[in-house]
Image (cartoon, grey):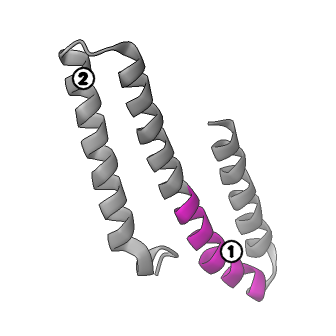
Amino acid sequence: MVGYSDHKQDQLRRLRRVEGQVRGLQRMIEDEKYCIDILTQVSAATSALQSVAISLLEDHLAHCVAEATAKGGPEAQAKVKEASDAIARLVRS
């Protein structure tokens, strides 16, 4: 079982919303809308994706990392490293 199983439908709903935002951005470009309006929508879509990422990270820490650290050993260290790397990627984006 993956850490986000309990929130799977919420995650899918959020991603569908982002998908709609991206389609809207494509239409805005096709319709040659004002640059600042497009940038505003890009920011909104980016924020929505970041929200999904944070939620997934929280679930991963609460489930996968917590479970591995409770067992201890090299798997625990690997899960913590994996989570740290994911956080670093999110901070850079």
Q: Amino acid at mark 1?
A: Val
Query: Camera-side residue: 41 or 63?
Result: 41
Give the distance between the C-alpha atoms of the residues marked 1 and 2, in whole angstroms. 41 Å
- The answer to whether residue 25 is above or below residue 19 is above
Is disc 2 surrounded by few (<14), some (14 to 19) or many (20+) residues within 10 Å?
A: some
| Image quarter (top left, top right, bottom left or bottom right) of the C terminus | top right
**Which mark, by number, is residue 45?**
none
Res 41 quadrant in image: top left
- Give the magenta part as a residue range: 54-70
Q: Amino acid at mark 2?
A: Met
User: Residue at image x 28%, y 45%?
Assistant: 19
- Please tell me whether residue 53 belongs to the stretch shown in magenta: no
- The answer to whether residue 89 is above or below residue 41 is below
Res 6 quadrant in image: bottom left
Is disc 1 surrounded by few (<14), some (14 to 19) or many (20+) residues within 10 Å?
A: many
User: Residue at image x 37%, y 23%?
Assistant: 37
Q: Horizontal placement of 14 versus 58: left or right?
A: left
- Rendering coords of residue 24 (x, y %): 24, 33
Q: Horizontal placement of 93 versus 47: left or right?
A: right
Name the residue carrying label 2. Answer: 28
Query: Camera-side residue: 86 or 37?
Result: 37
Question: What secondary structure is the stretch in magenta mostly built from?
Answer: helix
- Element under label 1? helix
Name the residue carrying label 1. Answer: 65
- Rendering coords of residue 20 (x, y %): 25, 44
Query: Camera-side residue: 51 or 78?
Result: 51
Q: Earlier in the sequence, mark 1 or mark 2?
A: 2
